[in-house]
Amino acid sequence: MCFIRLLHIDCIFFGFLPGFPYLNGLPRQLHTPRKSIPDRTVDAGSVAIGGSQTGIYPQESPGGWHIIGRSPVRLFDLLKEPPVFASPGDRWKFESIDPDTMDKMLITPPFPRKR
């Protein structure tokens, strides 16, 4: 799967689901209207575009955004303190990884630490 490398994406808030980040800064040419009919099931870790924003589904759920990729990062974990590793205002960067690395990371998803 080919993944577009996006830089300088800012987390503006969390909502919809616990740990679901709304990310701002998507290039205008990638803005995509939300789906008129939502999907009944979107996999956890799905990276999606809804309008001018990007989001990552922290758990399986219904969803009306267009899926463009997948992240192995665990976004929400009630056993961690805090349960979400990021905060509004944080800058995010997406990087492409090869399928073998993705498969390994999906077995034990990382929960990033703030720098």
Image (spheres, helix red, strand yellow):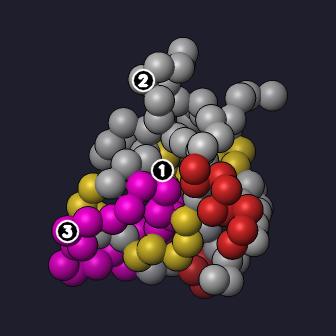
Residue of label 3: 40
Secondary structure type for disc 3: strand
Considering only order in the chain, which callout, 2 or 1, is on the residue closer to the N terminus? 1
Spatial CA span between label 1 and label 3? 20 Å
Q: Position of residue 115 (x, y in %)?
A: 81, 28
Q: Nearer the viewer, residue 31 or 47?
A: 47
Tell me what residue is drawn at x 38 percent, y 62 percent. 43
Q: Quadrant of the N terminus?
A: bottom right
Kind of residue indicated by mark 1: Tyr
Q: Are marks 1 and 3 in contact (CB under 8 Å)?
A: no
Question: Picture quarter containing residue 78?
Answer: top left
Q: Nearer the viewer, mark 1 or mark 2?
A: 2
Residue 22 disc label: 1
Is residue 43 found inside the magenta-colored segment of the image?
A: yes
Residue of label 2: 78
Tell me what residue is drawn at x 60 percent, y 43 percent. 108
Using residue 7 as the reference point, say whether residue 106 is left or right of it: left
Which segment did they paint magenta?
Answer: 33-55
Q: Position of residue 93 (x, y in %)?
A: 74, 55
Residue 94 disc label: none
Using residue 99 as the reference point, say whether residue 34 is left or right of it: left
| Residue 74 in sight in this render | yes
Is residue 95 found inside the magenta-colored segment of the image?
A: no
Secondary structure type for disc 2: loop
Q: Badge 2: few (under 14), some or many (20 or more) residues near its Cα, within 10 Å?
A: few
Residue 66 to residue 110: above or below: below
